[in-house]
Amino acid sequence: MGLSTHVLDTMHGCPAAGMVVELYTTDGGEAATLVKRFTLNSDGRNPDGPLYDNASLKAGTYRLVFDVKTYFVSRGVALPEPNFLSRVALDFGVAHTDQHYHVPLLVSPWSYSTYRGS
């Protein structure tokens, strides 16, 4: 299945529909190249399906950036300025392109958690 992501809004107990996410390749360092930018659908997922299928996924390092602040402001959450979390960036590696890499994010304005999902 390649690479996918899913975001759950733990403050409201629902998928983070409408959150903007960016996917980058990072070449193992700080230099990042934008691959795609997308807005999560009603299920908190990329509306176009997997970010990469198995045939397109390459071994290497990647970054997903989630626009947390804009999402919560759009939900009417009153946030302090500056907010505790603005954008959440997750750097991760793909070693086995024949496996599925699922990168879920559970997020509120004050915390987040991630793991390699199935």
Image (cartoon, helix red, strand yellow):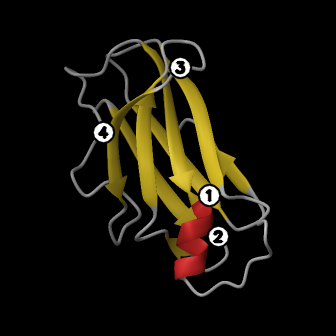
Q: Tell which tag, 4 or 1, sits nearer the viewer.
A: 4
Residue at image coords 71%, 68%: 109
Q: Alpha carbon of mark 3 to alpha carbon of mark 4: how far?
A: 20 Å
Circle 1 SS class: strand
Of marks 3 and 2, the one in the foreground: 3
Q: Mark 3 points at which residue?
A: 31
Between label 3 and label 1, give the one nearer the viewer.
Answer: 3
Residue 115 left/right relative to 41: right
Look at label 4 and name its amino acid.
Leu
**Secondary structure beneath disc 2?**
loop
Which of the two discs, 3 and 2, labels the residue nearer the N terminus? 2
User: What is the number of the mark on residue 51?
Assistant: 4
> Is 111 located above or below residue 62 in the figure?
below
* Distance of label 3 from label 1 (alpha carbons): 26 Å
Q: Is there a contact, CB below 8 Å, between mark 4 and mark 1?
A: no
The three-letter amino acid code for the residue at tag 2 is Thr
Mark seen at residue 79: none
Q: Residues within 10 Å of mark 1 (few under 14, many from 20)?
A: some
Q: What element carries label 3?
A: loop
Q: Which residue bears the numbered disc 1?
A: 106
Please identify the residue farthest to the front as the structure is shown.
Answer: 81
Residue at image x 59%, y 78%? 73
- 106 vs 101, left or right, is right
Write the residue at 53% across / 44% down.
Answer: 65
CB within 8 Å, label 2 to label 1: yes
Quadrant in the picture for the C terminus: top left
In the picture of the structure, the residue carrying the numbered disc 2 is 10
Instruction: Tell me residue 82's x, y (percent).
Output: 79, 66
Residue type at mark 1 is Leu
